[in-house]
Amino acid sequence: LALQQLRTLEIDNACEPVMFGQLLGMQDATSYALARAAVPIYKYVPYGTLDEVMPYLIRRAQENSAVAGAIRQEAASVMAEIRRRILRQSPRPRAAEASSANA
């Protein structure tokens, strides 16, 4: 949605840089999509003792209700890639790629 808004407002990212920041390990698929769109991304890592960091990470997880579903999706994607590499199969096209190829 943010990329769509940038286009709607005709913001030239080269002249008026817009960057996205994400917690490392969260929503990597979003990071890949932003990178494909040539949008700068930075990943941040909270650091400190476990007692200092865990409350922050728990708040982030609670704020993002999609985390559980995204984690399952990411895990399934990683497992599929591991299986593919073990079995030395060529990658399967994603549903969106397959439907656009058939169009």
Image (tube, rainbow, N blue to C red):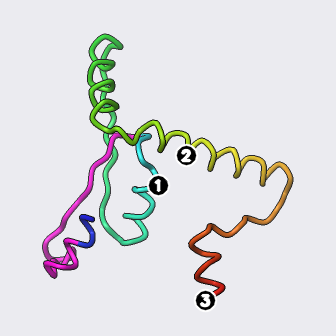
Instruction: State the image quarter where residue 49 is shown.
Output: top left
Task: State the separation of the CA atoms marked 1 and 3.
Answer: 25 Å
Please name the residue that numbered disc 1 is placed on: 29
The residue positioned farthest toward the top in the image shown: 51
Please name the residue that numbered disc 2 is placed on: 74
- Residue 19 location (% of width, % of height): 23, 59
What residue type is disc 3 on? Ala
Task: State the separation of the CA atoms marked 2 and 1.
Answer: 8 Å
- Residue 102 location (% of width, % of height): 66, 85
- Quadrant of the image containing the C terminus: bottom right
Residue drawn at 35 percent across, 71 percent down: 38
Indicate whether residue 98 is drawn in magenta: no
Residue drawn at 67 percent across, 69 percent down: 93
First of labels 1, 3 by sequence position: 1
Q: Is residue 82 above or below residue 62?
A: below
Position of 25 with respect to 63 (left or right) is right
Magenta-highlighted residues = 5-24
Residue drawn at 32 percent across, 26 percent down: 57
Q: What SS does tag 2 mark?
A: helix
- Residue 103's disc number: 3
What residue type is disc 2 on? Glu
Instruction: Classify 10 Å Cα crowding around label 1: few (below 14), some (14-19), many (20 and above).
Output: few
Residue drawn at 27 percent across, 69 percent down: 3
